[in-house]
Image (tube, rainbow, N blue to C red):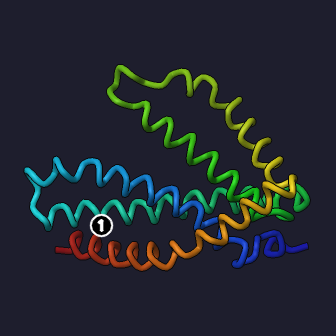
Amino acid sequence: MAIYNRFPKQKEIAPVYAVIVLMVYGWTILKFNYHLPGWLYFLNLGEITSVFAYSMVTNLLESLFVLFGVVAIAVILPKKWFSDAFVARGAGLSILILALMMYTASQFRTLDYYPSEIVRWLPAILVLIAVIAYLLGRANFTRRILELFADRAVIFLYITIPLSLVSLVVVLFRLII
């Protein structure tokens, strides 16, 4: 059996990527809007647009990195464990991992508030996340909910992918000039 056969199909990857995009871009836009009123006092429109463009390019790379991790897990694990319910398990795993990352990021207020508890419990938390993601894909009710949510989230790809590509052109143009 070729390794190519172990990869999920594009119609299964797109909904999982959409869930990742929804969370990553949503988090960044939330943080961007939080900082925007303060930036208006000392940044001009071009600089704010530049910050937004860099944020979108970073989001593109982050979301592709997370997607690569989910697909790699699907390729490495036995087909029965992950690939049979790739959309549900991939979306569940992505939601849980990104929620952990967002929670950890929100704990870093200053260097004094280093979240050592999270770091100490990280292996146990990751095992728990893996078990929960597996169980989410096993139960029909949660599996259908995750698949419906992921399917509905695909609409955000029509907004974020062109926005990210335009932002990439802006960032490359700024680096060249």
> Which image quarter holds the C terminus?
bottom left
User: How many circles with numbers are drawn on the protein?
Assistant: 1
Q: Position of residue 52 (x, y in %)?
A: 28, 63
Rendered residue at 80%/59% (across/down): 143
> Which image quarter holds the N terminus?
bottom right
The 10 Å Cα crowd at callout 1, few under 14, some 14 to 19, many 20 or more, is: many
Residue type, label 1: Ala
Q: Left or right? Give the position of 82 relative to 54.
A: right
Q: Left or right? Give the position of 4 relative to 126.
A: right
Up-down relation of residue 120 to residue 147 (above or below): above
Q: Where is residue 74 in the image (x, y as percent from the top left)?
A: 77, 60
Rendered residue at 52%/56% (across/down): 23
Q: Nearer the viewer, residue 134 or 151?
A: 151
Mark 1 falls on what kind of element? helix
Q: Left or right? Give the position of 48 relative to 97.
A: left
Rendered residue at 40%/60% (across/down): 58
Up-down relation of residue 147 to residue 24 (above or below): below
Quarter of the figure with residue 137 = bottom right
Q: Nearer the viewer, residue 87 or 83?
A: 87
Q: Position of residue 109 (x, y in %)?
A: 35, 30
Q: Nearer the viewer, residue 68 or 63?
A: 63
Question: Label 1 belongs to which residue?
Answer: 53
Rendered residue at 55%/59% (across/down): 65
Q: Position of residue 3 (x, y in %)?
A: 81, 70
